[in-house]
Image: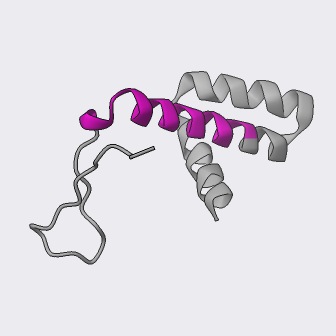
Amino acid sequence: MTRFLLVEAAQGATRYDEELRRDYLRVKFRRGGAVAKVAIARKLAVRLYWMLRKQPSSVPPARMQGSPENFLVENSPSPF
């Protein structure tokens, strides 16, 4: 499921981010479209990891789907 969601996000990101688009087209030319999508998805996952690792307090609180309007989930640092 995670791979599917990352690939979907990668497809959208390649439309708006020039750097990702260049990387996608380079890999697509060399290895094929399916491999290129997964490569960009992995690149997004690495970016997300480092964004959360370096500045966990900069991520705004997220509202959970189906929750009351005033209920926010605070992003706390991982104990690991």
In the orientation shown, which residue stands out farthest toward the front? 79
Decide if residue 32 is on the left or right side of residue 41.
right
Closer to us: 39 or 25: 39
What residue is shown at x 39% (from left), y 46% (from top)? 79
Residue 56 magenta: yes
Residue 27: percent from left, percent from top: 81, 29
Residue 15: percent from left, percent from top: 56, 37
Decide if residue 71 is on the left or right side of residue 56.
left
Residue 80: percent from left, percent from top: 46, 43
Residue 52 magenta: yes
Question: Which residues make up the magenta segment?
Answer: 39-58
Decide if residue 77 is on the left or right side of residue 49.
left
What residue is shown at x 41% (from left), y 36% (from top)? 52
What residue is shown at x 72% (from left), y 31% (from top)? 24
Decide if residue 18 is on the left or right side of residue 58.
right
Per the picture, the main secondary structure of the magenta-coloured stretch is: helix
Closer to us: 45 or 18: 45
Residue 23: percent from left, percent from top: 70, 25
What residue is shown at x 62% (from left), y 59% (from top)? 2
76 is higher (above) or lower (below) than 14: below
